[in-house]
Image (cartoon, rainbow, N blue to C red):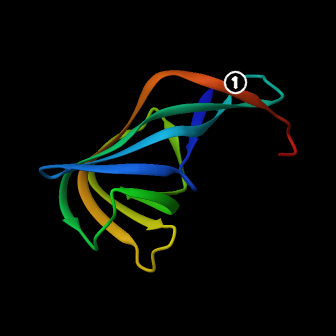
Amino acid sequence: MSFRIIQLEELKINITKDNNNLSLLFQGAHIKKTMDDAEEKTLWSQSGSIELRNITQISNEYNINEIISSISVSYDFYTYKNILVLPFEKKGNIYIEIIFKNKKSALDINCSGMEILLDGDPKYIKHIKKIE
């Protein structure tokens, strides 16, 4: 089965707010792609945004420009840490905890929708050997 995983750790983001929504815009996120029957994975780079919709609760302040040190996304019975499988679009009760570099406290967000939107075409970086 073929799938893609976006890596969110150490990702530089620009945060914009619109009513009860946040957009976390990013450039050059790393995406690992695994193909059926392939011996190696491939690494790609792509820009886009993480859209958090209908925020019901948000803790702490944030700067417009941040670097994600760690992120956890919880919904239903699942919790994902620092990576998400693409395409990613969830609706329901979603809890996100983001720890930014150079911050002591986490940004906790409750929202009812989350989606990762990718811009343009991905750019190939390299093949990943099994040991990486």
| Residue 52 seen anywhere in this rendered image of the structure | yes
Mark 1, Cα crowd under 10 Å, few <14 / some 14-19 / many 20+, is few
Q: Is residue 70 above or below residue 23?
A: below
Residue occupying the point 40% across, 59% down: 74
Which residue is at the front of the view, 34 or 102?
102
Q: Residue 99 appears at what percent x and percent y?
A: 46, 68
Could you tell me residue 94's position as x and y percent? 31, 56
Q: Is residue 78 visible in this depiction of the protein?
A: no
Residue 117 location, quadrant: top left
Pointer 1 residue = 35
Split into 4 quadrants, where in the image is the N terminus? top right
Judge from the rendering whether residue 34 lies leftward or rightward of residue 132; answer left or right: left
Q: Which residue is drawn at 40% across and 73% down?
A: 106
Q: Is residue 26 above or below residue 67?
A: above
Indicate the position of residue 86 as horizontal and vertical percent values. Answer: 49, 34
Image position of 52 (left or right of 123): left
- Measuring 70% from the left and 24% from the top, which residue is drawn there? 35
- In the displayed orientation, state which residue is furthest to the bottom: 104
Quadrant assignment, res 96: bottom left
Q: Is mark 1 on a helix, strand or loop?
A: loop
Q: What amino acid does circle 1 point to? A: Met
Residue at the extreme left: 19
Q: Where is residue 126 in the image (x, y as percent from the top left)?
A: 76, 29
